[in-house]
Image (cartoon, rainbow, N blue to C red):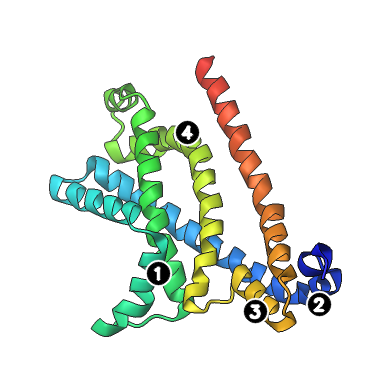
Amino acid sequence: MTLTETFFNTDVLWASLPILMRGLVNTLVLGLLAILFGVSCGLLISVVRLYAPKPLRLLTVAYIDVFRAMPVLVVLILVYYALPFVGIRFSAWTSAVLSFSLVMAAYSAEVFRSGIESVPAGQFEAAAALGVPFPVALWKVVLPQAIRIVIPPTTSNCVSMFKDTALASTVALPELLKEAQDAQALHANPTPLIGAAIIYLVFLLPLVRLVGILEVRFRKEKTR
């Protein structure tokens, strides 16, 4: 067989397309849920790390360090395969969303922390001088500025999260790569894997370029 017939077989690709699209939907849903929960929890964790009493700050530091140091695959395996031994059992979907969210929250917490610390401390002092309570100053003055700062690295983390969803095949969750592997086995041809790679490029490449554009724009704004 030629290279084209083996890796770029259009007949196999078209026959596999419905399966790949089903996997793409699962990948998008899984990634979006993990990003939604992870970024939201990451923001809360960063605020606790910066402004909570010391014992809580130490707990958040431990959480961030552990989940940033631990491979996503290990977290996924622990949640899906190890927790049942202590009586906690989750479905494949719940395990995947929980695992990815835990990791995303750890990375997002560090991003938000650096963003909040980049806002001049004088913002809090000015708010206090005007009689604005600390929580209100944080929510309405500091966080809007910090969120603008963290958009580029958060977008980059989102790209990484969508790629990491391929690990969900470990718990037999039918995401894009898992469906491509099943289609490859069905047709005895690796073309579905090439199709999956093309699909990843189509929806992730614009996000990658968006990260670059946002970084350039933010750099220009800082130099003004």
The tag earlier along the polypeptide, 2 or 3, is 2
Q: Measuring 43% from the left and 35% from the top, which residue is drawn there?
A: 146
In the rendered structure, the answer to whether residue 54 lies left or right of residue 138 reads left
The residue where tag 3 is placed is 182
Relative side of 8 to 36, left or right = right
Q: Nearer the viewer, residue 191 or 95?
A: 191
- For the residue carrying disc 3, how many other residues have a C-alpha within 10 Å: few (<14), some (14-19), or many (20+)? some
Relative height, residue 110 to residue 223 (above, below): below
Give me the residue at 28% from left, 55% from top. 66
Q: Are marks 1 and 3 in contact (CB under 8 Å)?
A: no
Residue 181 location (% of width, % of height)? 63, 74
Q: Which residue is mark 4?
A: 149
- Amino acid identity at mark 4: Ile
State how far apart marks 1 and 2 are (Cα).
Answer: 31 Å
Q: Nearer the viewer, mark 4 or mark 3?
A: 3
Three-letter code for the amino acid on which mark 3 is drawn: Asp
Q: Position of residue 17 (x, y in %)?
A: 77, 72
Mark 1 residue element: helix
Label at residue 76: 1
| Crowd rating for badge 4 (residues with CA inside 10 Å; few <14, some 14–19, many 20+) | many
Residue 87 makes an appearance in the image: no
> Looking at the rendered structure, which numbered label has been put on residue 224?
none
Q: Earlier in the sequence, mark 1 or mark 4?
A: 1
> Which of the marked residues, 1 or 3, is nearer the chain's N terminus?
1
Q: Which of the two discs, 1 and 2, labels the residue nearer the N terminus?
A: 2
- Report the residue marked by disc 2: 15
Q: Amino acid under label 2? A: Ala
